[in-house]
């Protein structure tokens, strides 16, 4: 991955997770001149996931391994991948997009597929930011090994919290899953696994009020019972927060349709309310956010882009044809 020499493309794909890589593959196969811009290594959330057991065809595959396979596959079909951070996506009066990056590059294309996923949501409590990297983490695969023999807390009740808590028991002596309700949102198979794990204990109906610590790191959590209102403390060596994602839709300059949390509304071609701007994967309004749904969205988006560009070329050509027809009659 390096710097791109070219600056004008048929389509620019923003984000290199499963959706972005799949969009790059289909764009390449569709003979489109595509650029994929990713701020880190391609793979997105796959790089933060240990084992994947629900991607059809792969009974069990390591996240980073699937990321590597997807990247190689996308590149095989000619995708150009650059490492840079997109700062803004803006539609110009002629309908084309200008994509600007942190490295000061300006890329142009008549279509953009936004697959930038989300950023881990923060609790927003005192101590969270102060102890980030010193006991507060948002990635079990990245940081779990630093907590050998510790007692840890995982916050959240969704798939990520329950799955990552299970992963953390490889290193930790004990993992508390602290959930604000008395019922998990996570899928049944993940719940069953966690309930069977002797190192996991659930703390129901509690939210974190404060993360406390010493200069070396986190030492305890202040909790509040969501039913009784009672306050308590829990001694832990670290806290992993998995309370969902905030979609990275803020890159779009201008108005676009979204829900109350900022997830992007698309039509069934994955086109947003801005003509030529498509969205795929975790940042789109949808029932669930799986690798399978991300690559499904991306497939539709890439094929829809081909159709969009063809229609656009015909529309541009039409007035000239009509003029010719009038002149020769
Ligand atoms: P999620 O499904 O949105 O779950 C977030 C959890 O955090 C919920 O249990 C929620 O509680 C809780 N929460 C939210 N704000 C909170 C706060 N301020 N304080 C305390 N708790 C809070 O998010 P996710 O687990 O990151 O998953 C995101 C998407 O990725 C989902 O569609 C999920 O299915 C998918 N995913 C799938 C897999 C897999 O299939 N293996 C793995 C990871 C993620 P409530 O339940 O009370 O709302």
Image (tube, helix red, strand yellow):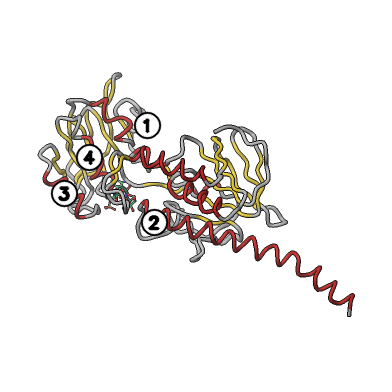
Q: CA distance from mark 3 to mark 1?
A: 28 Å
Give the image location of residue 78, x and y in percent: 56, 45
How much space separates mark 4 and mark 1, taking CA atoms? 21 Å
Contact between marks 3 and 4 (CB within 8 A): the answer is: no
- What residue did someone put label 3 on? 228
User: Tag 3, which secondary structure?
Assistant: loop
Mark pair 2, 3: CA separation: 39 Å
Nearer the observer: mark 2 or 3; the answer is 2
Q: Which residue is mark 1?
A: 129
Calculate the distance from the C-alpha at mark 4 to the C-alpha at mark 2: 24 Å
Mark 3 or mark 4, earlier in chain: 4
Q: Quadrant of the N terminus?
A: top right
Write down the residue under mark 4: 165
Which one is in front in this view, the residue at disc 2 or the one at disc 1? 2
Residue at x 54% of width, y 37% of height: 85
Taking depth in this image into account, of 229 and 298 the one nearest to the observer is 298
- CB within 8 Å, label 2 to label 3: no
Q: Residue 293 bears which disc, if any?
A: 2
Vertical position of residue 243 compared to residue 103: above or below: below
**N-terminal of the two: label 2 or label 3?**
3
Where residue 318 appears, as percent x and y from the top left, is 76, 69
Local packing at callout 3 (Cα closer than 10 Å; few below 14, some 14-19, many 20+) is few
Q: Secondary structure at mark 2?
A: helix
**77 lies left or right of 167:** right
Which residue is drawn at the image coordinates 45% and 58% (left, top)?
A: 297
Confirm or reject: label 4 Cβ below 8 Å from ligand 1: no
Q: Quadrant of the C terminus?
A: bottom right
The mark lying in front, picked from 4 and 2, is 2
């Amino acid at each position: 991955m390096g710097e791109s020499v070219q600056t004008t493309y048929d389509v620019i794909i923003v984000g290199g997770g499963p959706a972005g890589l799949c969009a790059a593959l289909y764009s390449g196969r569709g003979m489109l001149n595509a650029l994929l811009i990713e701020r880190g290594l391609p793979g997105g959330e796959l790089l933060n996931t240990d084992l994947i057991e629900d991607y059809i065809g792969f009974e069990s595959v390591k996240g980073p391994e699937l990321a590597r396979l997807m990247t190689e596959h996308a590149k095989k079909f000619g995708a150009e991948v650059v490492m840079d951070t997109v700062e803004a996506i803006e539609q110009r009066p002629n309908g084309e997009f200008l994509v600007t990056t942190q490295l000061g590059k300006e890329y142009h294309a008549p279509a953009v597929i936004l697959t930038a996923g989300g950023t881990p949501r923060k609790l927003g409590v005192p101590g969270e930011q102060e102890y980030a990297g010193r006991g507060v983490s948002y990635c079990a695969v990245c940081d779990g090994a630093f907590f050998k023999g510790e007692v840890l807390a995982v916050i959240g009740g969704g798939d990520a919290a329950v799955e990552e808590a299970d992963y953390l028991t490889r290193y930790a002596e004990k993992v508390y899953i602290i959930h604000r309700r008395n019922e998990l949102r996570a899928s049944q198979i993940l719940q069953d696994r966690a309930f069977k794990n002797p190192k996991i204990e659930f703390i129901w109906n509690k939210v974190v009020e404060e993360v406390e610590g010493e200069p070396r790191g986190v030492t305890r959590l202040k909790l509040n019972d969501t039913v009784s209102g009672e306050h308590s403390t829990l001694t832990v060596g670290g806290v992993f927060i998995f309370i969902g994602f905030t979609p990275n839709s803020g890159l779009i300059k201008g108005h676009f349709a979204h829900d109350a949390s900022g997830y992007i509304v698309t039509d069934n071609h994955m086109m947003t309310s801005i003509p030529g701007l498509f969205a795929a994967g975790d940042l789109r309004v949808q029932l669930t956010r799986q690798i399978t749904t991300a690559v499904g969205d991306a497939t539709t988006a890439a094929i829809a882009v081909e159709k969009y560009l063809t229609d656009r070329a015909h529309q541009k050509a039409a007035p000239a044809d009509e003029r010719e027809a009038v002149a020769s009659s």
